[in-house]
């Protein structure tokens, strides 16, 4: 198996983002000038598949009001956020709560989008079956939930 750097993983993720890897309610708003927009949840899951670590959840605030959530990864003392640039100056991410990753068959939101991003990233990295990945495929009919 080849050896990869974090830069290789980041490049594969960024090259794989598309309208189909965003939440369904956001797909019509795809903007190639801000490809990281709305990709945080699926990106954090795919990075977690490849590198392990923790998932971190924060809140997005505009003018002090909570408007959305934001996900990223943590490895030891290092936070890695591949989608942070999606936010405009007036959008502020506050808080950080480490969350346990649910098994793939319990994912409630953006399952198809996660599976697509995962497939695209693995193909770019020429990985067919990485060690440590969840073996259970999520059900496409999983109910959609928040967060």
Image (cartoon, rainbow, N blue to C red):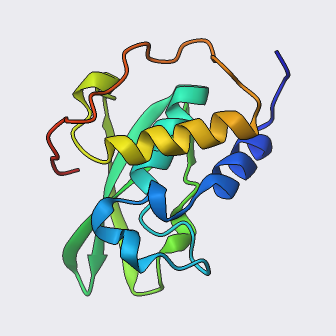
Query: Can you say whether 30 is above or below 20 in the image?
Result: below
Residue 119's spot in the image, x, y percent?
57, 36
Residue lying farthest to the front in this orientation: 141
Specify the quadrant of the image occupied by residue 25: bottom left
Residue 74 in sight here: no
Residue under the image location 54 percent in, 61 percent down: 83
Work out whether residue 70 or residue 24 is closer to the camera in this orientation and state it. Answer: 24
Residue 88 in sight here: yes
Query: Can you say whether 3 is above or below 143 in the image?
Result: above
Residue under the image location 74 percent in, 40 percent down: 124
Residue lying farthest to the right in this orientation: 2
Work out whether residue 54 or residue 142 is closer to the camera in this orientation and state it. Answer: 142
Q: Is residue 46 left or right of residue 2?
A: left
Specify the quadrant of the image occupied by residue 141: top left
Residue 144's spot in the image, x, y percent?
17, 46
Residue 76's spot in the image, x, y percent?
55, 30
Work out whether residue 55 or residue 32 is closer to the camera in this orientation and state it. Answer: 32
């Amino acid at each position: 198996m080849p050896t990869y750097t974090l830069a290789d993983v980041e490049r594969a993720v960024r090259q794989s983002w598309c309208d189909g890897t965003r939440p369904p309610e956001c797909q019509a708003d795809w903007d190639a000038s801000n490809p990281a927009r709305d990709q945080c949840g699926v990106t954090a899951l795919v990075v977690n598949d490849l590198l392990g670590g923790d998932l971190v959840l924060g809140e997005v605030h505009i003018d002090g009001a909570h408007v959305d959530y934001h996900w990223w990864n943590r490895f030891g003392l290092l936070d890695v956020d591949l989608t942070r640039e999606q936010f405009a100056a007036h959008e502020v991410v506050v808080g950080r709560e480490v969350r346990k990753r649910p098994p793939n068959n319990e994912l409630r939101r953006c399952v198809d989008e996660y599976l697509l991003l995962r497939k695209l990233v693995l193909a770019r990295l020429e990985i067919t079956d990485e060690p440590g990945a969840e073996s259970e495929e999520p059900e496409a009919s999983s109910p959609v939930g928040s967060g």
